[in-house]
Amino acid sequence: MTHTGKPSYECTVCNKTYTSKGGLKYHERSHTGDRHFSLST
Ligand SMILES: [Zn+2]
């Protein structure tokens, strides 16, 4: 994590962090969508 002081939004599924809420919300759709997301990382 960086010391930017900005709020970070963390995905509760894969713990990936985003600096914008919109970015996280868009990302979460890959988990909650109808398509199964392969956790290969
Ligand atoms: Zn995620």
Image (cartoon, grey):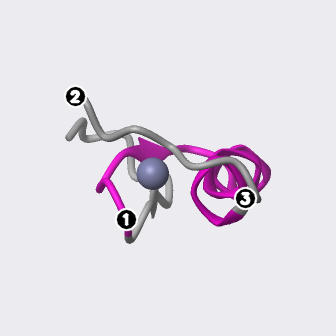
Quadrant (top left, top right, bottom left, bottom right) of the N terminus = top left
Instruction: Report crowding for label 1: few under 14, some 14 to 19, many 20 or more residues within 10 A (C-alpha).
Output: few
Counting from the top left corner in percent of width and height, residue 26 is at 76, 48
Q: Amino acid at mark 1?
A: Val
Q: Secondary structure at mark 1?
A: loop
> In the rendered view, does 13 fall on the left or right side of 36?
left
Examine the image and state in which quarter residue 27 appears.
top right
Q: Which amino acid lies under the numbered mark 2 shown in the image of this protein?
A: Thr
Q: Residue at x 63, y 57 (%)?
A: 28
Q: Residue at x 76, y 58 (%)?
A: 34
Q: Dot 2, how many residues are within 10 Å of its Cα: few (below 14), some (14-19), or many (20+)?
A: few
Q: Which residue is mark 3?
A: 25
Please tell me which of labels 2 and 1 falls first in the chain.
1
Foreground disc of the pair 2, 3: 2
Q: Which amino acid type is shown beneath numbered disc 3?
A: Lys
The mark that comes first in sequence, 3 or 1, is 1
Task: Please state if 2 lies on the left or on the right of 23 as rendered.
Answer: left
Which residue is label 1 attached to? Answer: 13
Bounds of the magenta segment: 13-32
Distance from mark 1 CB to nearest ligand 1 atom below 8 Å: yes
Residue at mark 2: 41
> Does 15 lie within the magenta span?
yes
In terms of sequence position, does the residue under pointer 2 or pointer 3 come before the other? Answer: 3
Residue 32 pos. (x, y %): 66, 66
